[in-house]
Amino acid sequence: MAKKLDDYGIKNLKDLLFHLPSRYEDRTRIIPIAQCQLNQRAVIEASVETCQSVFRGKRSMLVTLSDGSGILTLRFFHFSKQQQAQFSQGATVRCFGEVRRGKKGWEMIHPEYRVLKDFAQESVEEHLTAIYPTTEGIGQGRWRLWIKQALTQIRNLQFPELLPSELLENNKLPDLVSCLEILHQPPPNTSVDDLNSGKHPAILRLSLEELLAHQISLRQVRLEQKRDKAPKLITKKSLREQFIKQLSFDLTSAQERVLKEINNDLANPHPMLRLLQGDVGSGKTVVAAISALAALSKGFQIAIMAPTEILAEQHFKNFTAWFEDFDINIGWLSGSLGAKAKRESLAALASGETNILVGTHALFQEGVEYKKLGLCIIDEQHRFGVHQRLALREKGNFEKYGIPHQLIMTATPIPRTLAMSAYADLDVSVIDELPPGRKPVTTAVISEERRHKVLERVNSIVREGRQVYWVCPLVEESEHLQCQAAEITAQTLSEVFPNLKIALVHGRLKNAQKELVMQAFKAGDVNLLVATTVIEVGVDVPNANLMVIENAERLGLSQLHQLRGRIGRGADSGYCVLLYKAPLSDTAKLRLQTMRETTDGFKISEKDLQIRGPGELLGTRQTGLMQMRIADILRDAHLIPGLQDYADDILSTKPKHAQALVRRWLGDRLRYGMV
Ligand code: ADP
Ligand code: MG
């Protein structure tokens, strides 16, 4: 048991009292059947009228109860002869379960029940029943018993008040000990709804405290990292002017603004840790390139890491073009590089000949030695784990130059409140403006059955001289099958459109082949490109303005948004067709509807958060954040912004309180950013 409790971080009575219930049931009152409400979990006491075993497809036992106010049926699908005998006519039964609507009035399916001895006045529960998060081998009864014992000692244990008094007074919050007492053993008049929905002031108080503790711990990580040494990187004015002059466009004011924020950080002798958020197509790549100028000015190397080869190649090409007239060497490193090319690439990096290294995960693997790494740029952060990010940071020559600066770019906008809690160890810059001239993409959601309509559309778009993406996303869990599906689709479309030039790109093609296909599409030699989701990120073909996505109901919102971001990049408006197979699940319906209604990445991410919850949205990162004891990121998101200032204030004025809060709520769990 001690070992099991240790997994929960429970080592003493105080820890035990912080093991908080996840929900509540009201077993303090016997509810007359006539007053039952749909889906209510209620205690009923009534006598058996009939008990019969019926067979309709499968055997079940129906027990009809009456308490004078109404009739309620118990339904059992599994039952024994003894059970059947227990429900003899006239026996008094007390049962607890969820009230549902049956064919003949109220019903409970497999309730907990007890047959009461004649006229026995058995008492009901004194408190609302707390249901604890638990693990195999510790039953609810055991938690309740232990906690009941711990509660008898609660007044002898020291629970110092750690919340700022201002926060307590402004929100009229109860003191900590009362909150714990109420939450473990809520008095019978407490509203179960308030407790279960988190509206109860005791829950509010503890949630605030827990969120504050999390904020403090994240801010602490950030402060620690900020104490590290890093090279001061300042861009030479002439270099910047030369770079800007050759661009075919003016920077947007949002790009200028985030560049100021980035350059301010880089000029500091402490490592930058900045998240650059910007919707698909907002122009993050050029911001990355201009940020790199600061490192180049001081003779430092830059590493640019992207999650897929296609995207990394696109960066490589962009950077090569942008730096063509500069005395700069751009290196390439990816998993698929041949042994010889790899050796050469590594040698050039170690000697310092390479100024900018572009590539995939390969960039931070063992054996990759940088001469003088000053800046890491990581694209599409959500695809990389924290470990990978930290591994890259370790690639610096710490003794000599300090820790490299980090710029993390993501096109998956994270709702502000969530970003504040999940990325409190990062500073955030947002490009909240698209380059001028972008046309909105119109999205249609169309059933498979009306595929012919879509084909007509394809035809007319191609006749206008425009190009089409036809995306076949993952249907089966295997890449092989996915590619096969794409091959079959390409084949079918070729039969439908014998006059069109149709090409196919998927993950199993060799890089050189992929490259050829993409080039042909970019050059306009291909009318319709059938692709798997390999084109999800980064690919830029302005003349393509129709995208058809098959099986769209199976894709997540952020993936759909990324895919759709490939079109509408030219001068004309784009069209996106989401093909789906009926029937749609409720969440699929919601996703498709969201895609039809908005192209705003932030709105989409808010919806995504509501639909999927924060754990999935953030991926592997910060999973600890989601294992909160009482706070709920979705429910309590609005509390977080107000807490950040308190967190900073406590850290600087009451460091002991800060420590105690973190210990109370996070225990010895590894702190964020350090895992
Ligand atoms: P993302 O933020 O999705 O990575 P990119 O950096 O790929 O976007 O930029 C998308 C396209 O917009 C590219 O073709 C890029 O050259 C172009 N672009 C970037 N900034 C501007 C700007 N200020 N004005 C016009 N086009 C721009
Ligand atoms: Mg990009």
Image: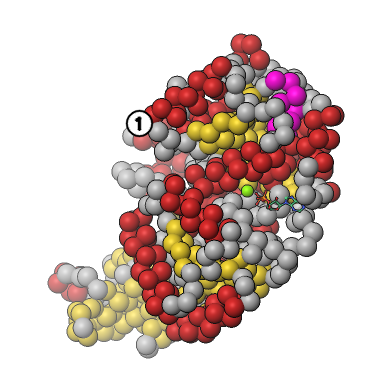
Start and end of the magenta stretch?
291-299
Q: Which residue is drawn at 35% across and 69% down?
A: 488
Question: Can you give x and y, in whole percent of width and height, for residue 390 in the image?
Answer: 55, 29
Please give the name of the residue rendered at 19% of the width and 74% of the height, measured from the top-left corner: 84
Point out the residue furthest to the top here: 399
Name the secondary structure under disc 1: helix
Asked whether 56 falls inside the magenta stretch, the response is no
Q: Which residue is drawn at 46% across and 68% down?
A: 502
Please tell me which residue lies in front, 187 or 505: 505
User: How would you rate the neighbour count of disc 1 (Cα within 10 Å): few for under 14, some for 14-19, many for 20 or more?
Assistant: few
Q: What residue type is labelled 1?
A: Lys
Q: Determine the residue located farthest toward the bottom in the rendered image.
A: 104
Q: Main secondary structure of the magenta part?
A: helix
Q: Mark 1 points at which residue?
A: 3
Whether label 1 lies within 8 Å of ligand 2 gets the answer no
Residue 46 visible in the picture: yes
